[in-house]
Structures are given as C-alpha cells and as structure tokens.
Image: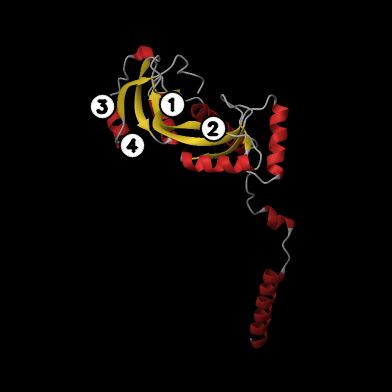
Amino acid sequence: MRNIFFSLLILNFAYLAYVVYSPVTPASVAAIPAVQPMPSGVGTLVLTTEIANGLERARQLNQVVNNPIYGEASDNVQCPALGPLTDLFAGQNLVETLKAQAFDVVLRAVDRPSGENDYRVLIPPAKTLQDAFRKLRVLKSSEIDSYVITQGPDALGISLGLFSARTAAELAQAAFVDEGYETLIREIPQIDREYWVFAPRSTGELVVDSGLWASIMADFPAIQQKMQVCTENNFIDV
C-alpha cells in the first residue's frame, strides 16, 4: 500500500512539472484567437476627409479675413445680416448652423474707421522692386527693423515703424534723417472689425423660426438682425 501511495505521488509531481515547464508548441499558439486587422483604407479615408474639411474651412476663413467690406462706403447697397460677431470662428459656426437649416448665407468681415490714426514712418516708394529690396538690405545690415510695403499707395516704400502717437513718429523720423535717410510720415486710419452673417440682398430679411432663433440667442446674446452695408461681390467664394 505504501509503495502504491508513493508511486501515485511521484506521478502527480511528474505531470505538474510537465505542465509548468513544457515549451509552447505551434498548436497551442494557433489556439490563441488572432486580433483581426481593420480593413485596409478605412482609417486613411476618415483621416483624409477630416484633413480636406479642415483645409476647406481654413481657406474660407482666409477669404473672409482678406476680403473685408468697408462699412462706411455710402454708395454701397444693404443686405439682411446677423451680427455683430467679434469672433471669426463663432461667425463660421453660425454660418454652418444656418446652412444646415437651408439658409443661403455667408460670413463677411466689416471694417469701419474708428476715428483714430496710427502713424507710419517710411522711406518713399522706390521705382522698382529691385531698388526697394536693395534699400532694404542696406537697412537690415544696419540692424534697422524694416520691411517692403507691398500694397496701397505706398507700395515699394519701406516701413520703418508704426506709432500710435504722431509725436513718437516725428522723433523717429528725425533720428532717421540724422542718419541720412529720406523719410515720410503717413497717417494710417485705425479700423474696428466686426463679423456679420449675410443673406442675399433679394432675401429682404432672414426669416428664422422661434426655436432656432432662441438657440442662436443663447449662443450670441447680443446678436441682432438688421440691414447692413454689403457690396456687389458680397457673395464672393467664401
């Protein structure tokens, strides 16, 4: 009996050692469920769509910023609009909300003179672009902060600084004259910029149901609907 007991005990220990120390076989690996890969192209398709949407939104906002309406122009017509919005992205969100409800609207920047001026000190415009950049290189070599003006009546001139007070501009001008530079002071009107959501002039007014209007008012408590100065190209591709 004692021999049988010890024989069984030895067999149990031998089996336990086999289970613990036996190597993993290909068959046992095959029994582990494999992780199924995502179908090829699905993730890339979603990412590409998101990138495309982001680029299109950026393009639209760039168009809004770079194509403002000048609100004080007396010869311009008026169109129904919602605003004012001080935040460009909030304005675009409102446009998307209204377009989802089938409204034909666009976001536009509206600039109005503030009644105050900045003062730019500049070297008068050069005859050619090459001459302007030749002068700029000389200024840069003297570590004078400057850049070539590319738009407006002073295009090809070189800006030497923008000042909020005329007296500061005059002091800067005197210092440049002492160094041998011919300079001018140009008044630059300051503008206040708002963003308005416009409907076509033919619309007459934006008829928004009470539920949607309550939702808009909750997001923009100061919003109003009014006839606002617009232009013939009010509906540029934005």
**Among numbered discs 2 and 4, the one appearing first in the sequence:** 2
- Where residue 107 is drawn, which disc sits there? 1
Mark 2 lies on residue:
58
Nearer to us in this view, 48 or 185:
185
Q: Residues within 10 Å of mark 2 (few under 14, many from 20)?
A: few
Nearer to us in this view, 208 or 44:
208
**Among numbered discs 2 and 3, the one appearing first in the sequence:** 2
Point out residue 114 in the picture as x, y percentages from the top left corner: 39, 32
- Where residue 219 is drawn, which disc sits there? 4
Disc 2 element? helix
Rounded to the nearest angstrom, the CA distance separating label 1 from label 2 is: 13 Å
Rounded to the nearest angstrom, the CA distance separating label 1 from label 3 is: 22 Å
Mark 3 lies on residue:
210
Q: Nearer the viewer, mark 2 or mark 3?
A: 2
Q: Amino acid at mark 2?
A: Ala
Q: Is residue 49 above or below residue 206?
A: below
Q: Quick check: can you spot residue 13?
A: yes
Most extreme residue toward the top is: 202
Q: Is residue 78 above or below residue 125?
A: above
